[in-house]
Structure formats: structure tokens, C-alpha cells
Amino acid sequence: MQILGQLGFFDLTARYDALSQKGDPLEHLAQHIPWARFRQTLEKSLARSKRPKGGRPPFDAVLMFKVLVLQALYNLSDDQTEYQIRDRLSFMRFLGLDLHQRIPDAKTIWLFRETLAQAGVVDTLFTQFDTYLAGQGLQARGGQLIDASLIPVPKQRNTREENAMVKAGECPADWEAQPAKRRQKDTEARWTKKHGVSHFGYKNHVNVDKRHKLIRRYTVSDAGVHDSQVLEEVLQSQAAGRDVWADAAYRSDEIEIQLKKRNLRSRIQYKSYRNKPLTAKQTQTNQRRSRIRARVEHVFGHHVMAMGGKLIRTIGRVRAIAKIGLKNLTYNFQRFLVLTAAAGGQTA
């Protein structure tokens, strides 16, 4: 006998069919991303973790990875992720869960992400998918678009003296005396100013290929690091394209020399200086280069408009690297679906 209000098997099937007819984006993500390719890397990192023996069996590693992808896709906290999995049929179908199955709670989600973060596994997963993209004919081509985006974290309400000590690599005495308070203090994020507005957090430095608009390399720094200081970390070889586009923040004699040594062509925008404005020719060149360089801004715009914004709720650089890496990887998942749909849906 079916309890009043309880979904039966055929009711659930009808609901899922209705979701498919409405174009559930998670259904396409579940079907066309090669999730099984990540299993060995995920299970290897979990095998090294210090999970206590006994108790309930752990959740499947790929299922938990997909949970983190949902977090990155909708910018959800751990508690909200647990709630939304319980509440949304599209989330449950994406994870392959039935109504009667156990749901990972917020603590389980945190522990899984923490394990991946401490092991530095997210970068490995990102590289694995980039290799898969190449196998699908989506190698980096056309040139390299370089840029960085500020990633805010919850602001620290510190005094000037506390901030000075943190910047000097010291820990205020009252923080040491209050471990709970110390755990909530991010001593690795930094303040910076952009267009006169103060920002606190980190930076997501990316290399996006011109042809496919996929993120090919990324690195994470605190917000106080100048964009040009990490250019070397995100550059690729000339196989990805000899032309390198970037805004004027990256222009310097040192960088121009560096690019020439790597046999790369600078398409970095010209910079004006006090008492030395741009010439008419340089202005025209900047306008041409800006139209191409703007493609990298579309990536960051997607993070904001389609993925719930850039704010991350983490403490410390290691966790920030994992969160930002998952955001970049999830963007590539979505971009891959767009590219393969445009090519007639030829996916593996």
C-alpha cells in the first residue's frame, strides 16, 4: 500500500522524464563526462587518508567527486549541498542515488574535499581531463590568453596590529590562546586594491586557449600577488600557440624577453605611463588585441553568472587551491559539453 504523498516507482520515473524533457543540464553532465577515468586517482588518494576503521562503509569515491562538482557548479556550502541533494531530484539522479539510499552529510562532504585538498589531487584530476580533451580532438590551439581573477573569501575582522603581525608571518598571542578563533582566521589570504576598491582573498590565474576557450593551466596565489609575477607558471609551450595575449598589467621588458626566449610572440597590450600616453598606433593595436583577449573574460563571467559567483568559503591557501581548481575543472566540463554539442554531440 502506498502512503499518501509518497512517490511510487512510476511517479518517480514520470518526474525524471519531465526533467529530461525540460533539458536537465545535470543529465548531460552525467552522461558525457568520463567519470570512471577519475576513479583510480580518487581511490588512491583516499587509501592514503587516515580514515578510522570500522563504522559505516565509505561512500563511492566517484559519487563524492560528483558531489564536489555540484558544489562548484552552484557555489554551495557543505550544509546547503547536503540539503539540496535531499531536496532535488535532479541532484539525486546526477549522483545515481535512489530515494531510499543514504545521503552524504555536510561533514562527510567536508572530509572528502579536505582529503583531496591535503593530497593535492585536484590538479591531477584537472590534468587528467585535459589529456582526455586532447584525445577528443580538443587540444590547445590558436594561442594563449592569460588573465587573473580575484577570488574573495570571508573578510577577517582584524585590528591593524593583528594584520601587521599576520603579514610578518607571526600569530597574535590571543589567537594562540583561543584555538577555535585561530581556526577561523585565514592568515594566507591578502588584501589588495583594484580600481580603488579593497578586496580580500586569492587570485585565480588562468591560461585559456584561443580556439576552444578551455582553461589549460591555472595557479592560485594570494590577492596581493601581481598578475605578472606568476606568468611563467601558467604559460604553455608553443604547441598551444605561439601568440600570448594579456592585458597591460603583464607588460614589462622582463616579460617581453621571457617570451622571446620561449619562442613565443607577445600580443600583450601596451601600457601608458605618466607623461607618456599611448600613440595612436598603440591605441589601435590595443583595440585589436582587446577583442581577442576578451575571450578570457568570458570564462570569469561564466564563473560569476552561471556558477553562483566566485566567493569561496575556505580557510587557508591549500583549501583555496582545491576549491578554485574544482571550479576551473567544472567550467571545463561545461565547456566540453558546449563544444561537443556544437560538433554534433560526438562524445565518448
Image: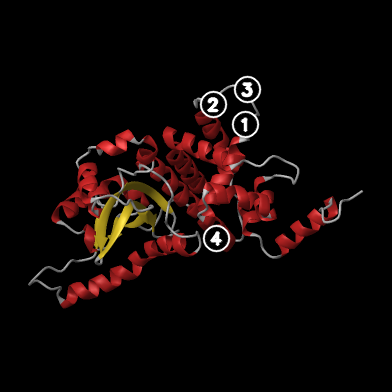
Q: On the rendered structure, is 258 left or right of 287?
A: left
Give the CA separation, mark 2 to mark 3.
9 Å
Residue 186, percent from left and from top: 34, 44
Location of mark 4 (residue): 338
First along the sequence among labels 4 and 1: 1
Callout 2 secondary element:
loop
Q: Amino acid at mark 4?
A: Val
Estimate how packed mark 1 is, as few (under 14), some (14 to 19) or many (20 or more) residues with alpha carbons within 10 Å: few
Residue mark closest to the camera, 3 vs 1: 3
| Nearer to the camera, 188 or 294 | 188
Give the CA separation, mark 3 to mark 1.
10 Å
Q: Amino acid at mark 1?
A: Pro
Location of mark 3 (residue): 54
Q: Residue lying farthest left? A: 275
Q: Amino acid at mark 3?
A: Gly
Residue at 57% in and 61% down = 343
First along the sequence among labels 2 and 1: 2
Q: Is mark 2 in CB contact (under 8 Å) with mark 1?
A: yes
Residue at 18% in and 55% down = 256
Q: On the rendered structure, is 58 left or right of 11?
A: left
The disc label shown at residue 51, or none: 2
Q: Residue lying farthest bottom? A: 280
Q: Amino acid at mark 2?
A: Arg
Location of mark 1 (residue): 58
First along the sequence among labels 4 and 2: 2
Residue mark closest to the camera, 4 vs 1: 1
Give the CA separation, mark 3 to mark 4.
44 Å
Residue at 19% in and 66% down = 270
